[in-house]
C-alpha cells in the first residue's frame, strides 16, 4: 500500500522512541512534515529527526503532566508549522501496581500519573488541536490505545482504565467532530517489540507472550505505524470512531 502525505503536517506525541519514532519515519517517507514531540530524551529525539527523510520537520519538547505544558505544546506546534493536519496521540506510560499490596498514597500517585499522561493529556491536546483543525477545514486524530482496554490488566488497572477512557473519549469526539470534517480513530495494539516491553519479552514468560498470537510473535513498531498511516490516509472518513485491533489475533472481541 502506497501512502502520500505531501504537504501534510503531523504532530506525534512521544515520538523519540518505539511506536512514535517508527510512525514519524513512515510519515516522513510518505512526504509528511513531522513534529516530533518528546519530554526529556533530547538525544533520542535528535536521533529520530536525523533518521527522517528530509522535510520541514521539527523537534518540540513539552511536559504532559501539566495543563500549561499541554497548552504550550499545542500552541508551539501550530506556530512552528502554521497548521496541523494530523495528530497522533502516542505518548503514554505503563506501570504495574498490585492494588492488594500497595499503600494508598502510592496507589493514588500511580493512578493520577497514569491517567494524567495517558488520558488527560491526550484529551486536552485533542481539544486544542481539533479546534485548530476546524478552523483549517478539517483533519484527523489517531489515538494509540491498547487491547488492555478490553481484556483488563490486573497488574496495571490504571493503564487499562486510561486506555478505555481514551477509546470512549475518542468515539465521543468522532461523533462531535464529524460535521466539522475532523475524524477520530483508535489503534489498539497488544504487546509491541519496544524498549518498554523488552524486559517482559526477554524474561521467563517471553515465549508465552509471543504465543498469545497464532503468529508466534508480538507486533513490530512497523505493524502499528502501518495501521496509523492507513487510518490517516484519505478515503476512510466514514470509519471515524473505529477502534482498529492490531494484536495478531492475540485477543479477539
Image (cartoon, helix red, strand yellow):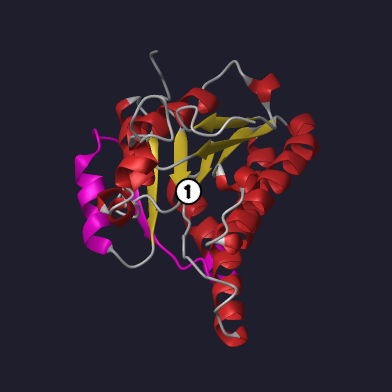
Q: Nearer the viewer, residue 170 or 192?
A: 192
Provide the residue span drawn in magenta: 42-71
What is the x, y in percent for residue 245? 55, 31
Q: Nearer the viewer, residue 39 or 169?
A: 169
Q: How many marks?
A: 1
Q: Is residue 61 above or below residue 186?
A: below
Q: As drawn, is 130 to the left or to the right of 246?
A: right
Magenta-colored stretch includes residue 133: no
Q: Which quarter of the rendering shows the C terminus?
A: top right
Q: As drawn, is 44 to the left or to the right of 76?
A: left
Q: Secondary structure at mark 1?
A: loop
Q: Which quarter of the rendering shows the N terminus?
A: top left
Q: Is residue 152 above or below residue 100?
A: above
Residue pictured at 34% horizontal, 52% vertical? 197
Residue 83 appears in view: no
What is the x, y in percent for residue 38? 37, 59
Asked where in the image residue 28 lies, by quadrant, the reply is top left
Q: As drawn, is 111 to the left or to the right of 135?
A: left
Asked where in the image residue 162 lies, by quadrant, the reply is bottom right
What is the x, y in percent for residue 142? 56, 38
Residue occupied by mark 1? 90
Q: As drawn, is 252 to the left or to the right of 227?
A: right
Residue pictured at 57% horizontal, 85% vertical? 103
Q: Is residue 214 above or below residue 111?
A: above
Outermost residue on the top side: it is 1
Q: Is residue 120 above or below residue 220?
A: below
What is the x, y in percent for residue 161? 65, 57
The residue carrying pointer 1 sits among few (fewer than 14), some (14 to 19) or many (20 or more) residues within 10 Å by Cα, namely many
Magenta-colored stretch includes residue 57: yes
Amino acid at each position: 500500500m502506497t501512502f502520500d502525505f505531501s504537504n501534510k503536517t503531523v504532530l506525534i506525541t512521544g515520538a523519540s522512541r518505539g511506536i512514535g519514532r517508527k510512525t514519524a519515519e513512515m510519515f516522513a517517507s510518505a512526504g509528511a512534515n513531522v513534529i516530533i514531540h518528546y519530554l526529556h530524551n533530547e538525544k533520542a529525539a535528535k536521533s529520530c529527526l536525523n533518521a527522517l527523510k528530509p522535510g520541514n520537520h521539527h523537534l518540540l519538547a513539552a511536559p504532559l503532566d501539566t495543563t500549561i505544558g499541554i497548552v504550550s505544546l499545542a500552541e508551539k506546534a501550530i506556530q512552528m508549522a502554521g497548521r496541523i493536519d494530523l495528530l497522533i496521540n502516542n505518548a503514554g506510560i505503563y506501570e504495574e501496581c498490585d492494588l492488594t499490596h500497595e499503600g494508598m498514597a502510592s496507589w493514588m500517585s500511580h493512578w493520577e500519573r497514569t491517567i494524567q499522561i495517558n488520558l488527560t493529556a491526550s484529551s486536552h491536546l485533542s481539544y486544542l488541536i481539533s479546534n485548530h483543525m476546524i478552523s483549517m477545514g478539517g483533519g484527523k486524530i489517531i489515538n494509540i490505545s491498547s487491547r488492555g482496554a478490553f481484556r483488563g490488566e490486573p497488574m496495571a488497572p490504571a493503564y487499562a482504565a486510561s486506555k478505555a477512557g481514551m477509546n470512549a473519549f475518542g468515539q465521543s469526539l468522532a461523533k462531535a467532530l464529524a460535521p466539522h470534517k475532523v475524524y477520530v480513530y483508535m489503534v489498539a495494539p497488544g504487546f509491541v517489540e519496544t524498549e518498554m516491553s523488552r524486559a517482559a519479552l526477554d524474561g521467563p514468560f517471553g515465549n508465552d507472550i509471543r504465543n498469545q498470537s497464532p503468529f508466534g510473535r508480538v507486533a513490530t513498531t512497523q505493524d502499528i505505524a502501518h495501521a496509523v498511516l492507513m487510518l490517516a490516509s484519505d478515503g476512510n472518513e466514514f470509519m471515524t470512531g473505529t477502534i482498529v485491533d492490531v494484536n495478531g489475533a492475540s485477543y479477539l472481541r
